[in-house]
């Protein structure tokens, strides 16, 4: 299963849960004499908690992964610049030694 299909299933199920909670709330309100039953409120709370967890965890991990990638790239760039500058210093030193001979 690819990452894209996993995300689609997660987001789809979260949206379906919120949608089912809204529909259930409207049906309970209008079919129950303008009163929403306790069980329906509990279901809505669970649906919202589930959807919030799906969206929140996904966003959190994407943010942290992005931060890690940018830090890793910056450290790699610094490492490569230091290595290149050390190589230039070595070349300059070897050139100076050759010029002295």
Image (spheres, helix red, strand yellow):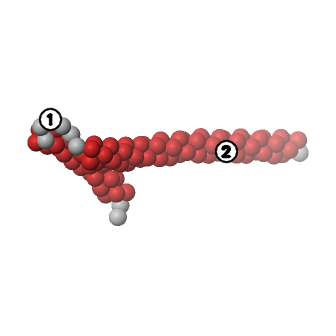
Q: Which residue is drawn at the image coordinates 70% and 46% (left, top)?
A: 83
Residue 13 vertical placement versus 70 (above, below): below
Q: Can residue 31 be seen in this view?
A: yes
Q: Nearer the viewer, residue 101 or 77?
A: 77
Task: Point out the residue furthest to the right here.
Answer: 101
**What kind of element bears circle 2?**
helix
Q: In which quarter of the image is the N terminus?
A: bottom left
Measured as percent of width and height from the top left, residue 22 is found at: 21, 41
Residue 21 vertical placement versus 34 (above, below): below
Mark closest to the chain's N terminus, 1 or 2: 1
> Residue beneath label 1, please?
34
Q: Do the residues labelled 1 and 2 touch (CB within 8 Å)?
A: no
Residue 2 vertical placement versus 35 (above, below): below
Measured as percent of width and height from the top left, residue 49 is found at: 36, 45
Binning the other alpha carbons within 10 Å of mark 1 as few (below 14), some (14 to 19) or many (20 upward) gives few
Whole-angstrom CA distance, mark 1 to mark 2, is 67 Å
User: Which dot, 1 or 2, sits closer to the camera?
Assistant: 1
Q: Which residue is drawn at the image coordinates 37% and 57% (left, top)?
A: 3
Q: Can residue 19 be seen in this view?
A: no
Q: Which residue is drawn at the image coordinates 63% and 43% (left, top)?
A: 75
> Residue beneath label 2, please?
79
Measured as percent of width and height from the top left, residue 60 is found at: 46, 43
């Amino acid at each position: 299963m690819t990452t894209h299909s996993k995300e689609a299933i997660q987001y789809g199920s979260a949206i379906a849960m919120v949608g089912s909670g809204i529909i259930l709330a409207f049906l309970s309100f209008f079919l129950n004499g303008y009163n929403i039953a306790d069980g329906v409120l509990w279901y809505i709370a669970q649906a919202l908690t589930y959807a919030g967890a799906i969206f929140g965890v996904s966003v959190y991990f994407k943010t942290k992964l992005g931060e890690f990638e940018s830090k890793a790239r910056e450290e790699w760039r610094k490492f490569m610049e230091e290595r290149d500058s050390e190589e230039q210093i070595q070349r300059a030193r070897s050139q100076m030694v050759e010029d002295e001979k």
